[in-house]
Image: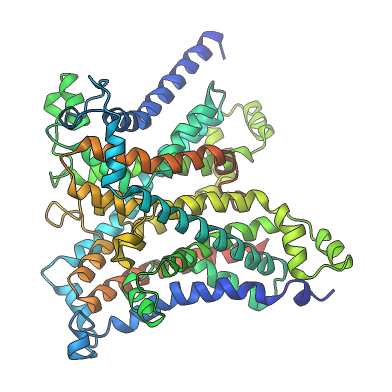
Amino acid sequence: MGKSKRIIQAIIKQVVCIALSLLVLVPLYMVVINSFKTKGEAARMSLKFPTTWVFGNYADVIQKAGLIRGFANSMIYALVATSVGVIISAMAAFVLSRNRIRINRKLYYFFIIGLFFPVNYVTLVRVFQWFHLTNTRLGIILVFISSMVPFCIFTIYSFVESVPREIDEAAVIDGAGPLQMFFRVDLPMMKPTIVTCFILEFMGVWNDFLTPLYLSSKSSLFPMTMAVYQFFGKNQQYWNYVFADIVMTLIPVIVVYFIGQRYLLEGTTGGSVKG
Amino acid sequence: MNKNKIYPRWFVILPLIIYVVFFLFPSILGIFYSFTDWGRMTSKNGLHFVGLQNYIDLFTSNKNYMDGFWNTIRFTLISNVVKIIPAFFLAILLNSRLKGKKFYRTVFYLPSILPFVIIGIIFKSIFSYNTGLLNSSLTALGLGALKQKWLSDPGMVWNSIFSVDAWRGIGYVMTIFLAGLNTIDDSLYEAAEIDGAGFWKKLSYVTLPMMRGPIMINLVFGITYGLKVFDIIYVLTNGGPGHKTEVMTTYVFQLYGSGQYGMSTAMNTLLLAVTAVIGVIIVRVMSGKEAEG
């Protein structure tokens, strides 16, 4: 290839990538910049800088939108459900992958089928009544765990193959029980896939909307997504507030994204990508 | 060494119980209730079996429930095509020699971590007819003739939904392709180049065959996502204008909201049947592959 042709190609590639980046970033920029405007100015939704910067929007929204409670709820749901869900899925995936007797292979596919099924929230409401879980955080957390189990087992199962079996044998010879062996020896080796699952599921719970929509009638149990949606419903003319609310809801996810992006972008699918 | 002892079965019990009780059991229970008149008045009137009545109502009612069914299928097909094909070429672009590829990868992936509810609200503002960013940009560029009622024109609304869905999802699909492209050995391309293969030949003889895994993953995730889509439609259009963008899950929610729980679970069971058929096919293919290897 000639040098000038290569330069032209590089320029075209850059133009395409910059255009696409703008397509992603401009809507987000619009949200941020308009969150600092007055009500009237924000309603025009332009990309211009505010004539006066209204930082008070944020303080107003924190008060009006019940954001602190929403934030605390989202944090509790995401942290508890994800920690418990990923660890117990890892234990199950580990055993299913290491000991492939007939029943274990059947169990694996029994879990995987859950990747496809829709959750039936309507009857879940009924199940909640039977177990006295209606309008409880525990119930919501259990539902989040149940729906992340198939994906986590699917992802971790294939990764376990890359963890050498010899280390298990060494641990057993040293007198470790199964629990000790798993947590001291195998789990640390599974860190990349565990972290990937944790981040994906954390964001999945944080972003979820359907579960609280069906299962909590008490606004004191609402996570941030529900709080924002409700706030949006009531304040459609106050775009400055809605945008400020959105910015604050997005900050935690974006922080988690930048901390964990190495794991997300490089380990998204673990071993399952290999053709 | 005794495998059942070092890899004890009880490691599986806790996730199994939670999965069965809160995920599978409600679905099975749904099948049962879909043959009843379960509803808001049941506590007063009792529960009665109605046979196939709910299903007959779904298929024959003048409320267009079947449109919801076809819209779901259509959404699944189109949303995957408009995401997977561009994402594939984008991954090839980012895998080639390119300055700033790390930055671009981070930016392109970003939308897929954002909550649908928020994306929905943002694009509701962008699409708004009088003040929205899209129409005002078109006017500013002198293209005012292209202004649209993006969310309320029945001929346009699906395109708007597909665009927002692609805006969110392309980066994720692209990342899975990129992970696959990383595993292809450069020497394969070099060999193909020596044989005189150009871009398209290399694509069809080297890249595509090596990308079967990632393509499969993207199809599996994409299809299951498409069949179960709810949030983005609920927030952007809530099924409107009219019932133009209603899908199965929005009908499930509406029927639940109006207290027709039996009908609602019948709709959900229909969705379950569709996903089960597709799921069983995919799992068969996967387990067949494992048996081969």
Please tell me whether residue A135 is drawn above or below residue B145 in the rendered image: below
> Would you say B115 lies left or right of B160 here?
right
**Which residue is rendered at x = 78% and y = 56% of the image?**
A164
Q: Is residue B149 left or right of residue A248?
A: left
Residue A125 makes an appearance in the image? yes
Measuring from the top left, give residue B244's x and y in whole percent. 16, 54
Please report the residue visible at 25 percent of the width from the left and 57 percent of the height from the top.
B71
Between B116 and A67, the one lying in front of the other is A67
State the residue in front, B182 or B236. Answer: B236
Which residue lies at the image location 20% right of the left edge and 50% below the top edge? A233
Question: Can you give x and y, in whole percent of width and height, for residue B206 in the image?
Answer: 59, 38
The residue furthest right is A173
Residue B119 image point, x, y percent: 32, 43
**In-front residue for pair A254/A93:** A254
User: Which quarter of the figure is the N terminus of chain A placed in?
Assistant: top right
Q: For residue A245, which quarter of the picture?
A: top left
Quadrant of res A223: bottom left
In the picture, measured across the screen, residue B209 lies left or right of residue A140, that is right
Is A216 placed above or below A191 here? below
